[in-house]
Image (tube, rainbow, N blue to C red):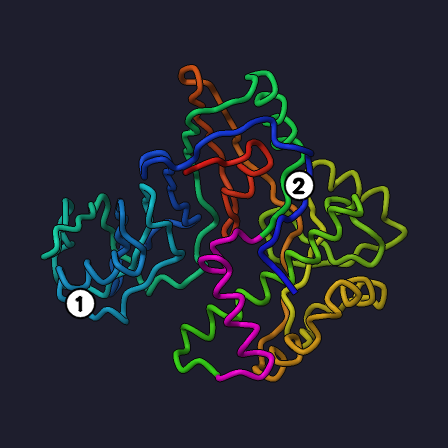
Amino acid sequence: MSGTGDWPLAWGTPVGTARVAVSPEDFQVDERLGFAPTGDGPHLLVRIRKRGLTTQQAVQQLAGHWQVERRAMGYAGRKDRQAVTTQWLSVPWPVNAPLAPLGRVVDQDGQALDVIDVQRHRRKLPVGALTGNRFTLTLRDVDAAPRDIAARLVTIARHGVPNYFGGQRFGRHGQNLDRALEWLTGGERPRSRNDRSMLISAARSAMFNAVLARRIDAGDWSQPRPGDLLVLDGRGSLFAAEAAETAFNRRRAAGLRIHPTGPLPGATNRRQPQTAALIERESAVLQDWAAVIQALTDQRVTADRRALRLSVGALAGWRMAPGTWRLRFELTRGAYATMVIRELVEVVND
């Protein structure tokens, strides 16, 4: 069983090689919440810009600086450490107190983040409360013909990319997945709830990637098959692909409006009824994972679904100088920019 191998590509061999994220400034991420602050309430929505910090470190730093309860703070999503990122945090704040100040926050170790916006809000920001992220990536030492890069970018914009979970989901050298498999096949249960959650995510992500890889090999990863559960682009509602609507669904899929989905295994989710054909197809791929799936069921982890295809919004790429390209695009929440890059170039960072 493996979830971190060389997953098949959708659009053929990368058009060349490049170095990616040579410096944090080469990998910029801006979080998009998708809603506006309420303007009143016992919390603040605080937009920060960070560099060289994890989201957890940024939360801890701001909690200490403003003397607020760390557990009462919230964030919508975690952002990379080796990047320049903006994201929103929620901070508990007395309703009669003035707004917290903008500006730079520096801790005792010299780590800094910038508070760039502060607004009142009625509730704590929950994980997942974002619509997506906007990326600005700089590729350096690019060894590829500009026309080939341009052509591949057109393909990606028109047809999307496989929605794999990125390698970071599985830990360094896949160690999170190894730990998950050891635990879920009879090993010692991790004590920390956060640790258990991380390992469960690694196992489910690996199984999803395995199903997606099989469908790429079959050539139908982006096309609805009768019996599939489909999802609207950027939405969470699922519906079955009816045989009578095959041509209609294929037109919608060609326009990136709907996508087939793959499994995040666990206990049966009655709100997501599956056809016998779909269960049979996916069970055949995951037969070696039966013990892991049973363990997830025993842990009361509810099964879910994820789109097999990722649409890449507002994609633009241009050459800044010989050997240097800049890309901009938008992805829905839970998607990995590295999955876009791997369909374009082979990364050759030292």
Quadrant holding the N terminus: bottom right
> Is 221 in front, or is 214?
214
Q: Earlier in the sequence, mark 1 or mark 2?
A: 2
Side (left or right) of 137 relative to 38 = right
Q: What amino acid type is highlighted by mark number 2?
A: Leu
Q: Are dots 1 and 2 in contact, CB under 8 Å?
A: no
Q: Residue furthest front?
A: 350
Q: Look at the picture and state if 196 lies above or below 258.
A: below
- Label 1 to label 2, Cα distance in Å? 46 Å
Please state the extent of the stretch shown in magenta in the rendering.
165-188
Q: What amino acid type is highlighted by mark number 1?
A: Val
Image position, residue 350 (x, y; %): 41, 38
Looking at the rendered image, the disc whose residue lies closer to the viewer, 1 or 2, is 2
Q: Is residue 178 magenta?
A: yes
Image position, residue 317 (x, y; %): 49, 24
Identity of the residue drawn at 78% across and 57% down: 228
Side (left or right) of 124 relative to 144 = left
Q: Look at the picture and state if 315 lies above or below 211.
A: above
- Using the image, tell me which numbered label, if any, was put on residue 68: 1
- Using the image, tell me which numbered label, if any, was put on residue 9: 2
Using a 10 Å C-alpha cutoff, classify the residue at mark 2 as few (fewer than 14 neighbours), some (14 to 19) or many (20 or more).
Answer: some
> Is 69 in front, or is 82?
82
Image position, residue 196 (x, y; %): 46, 75
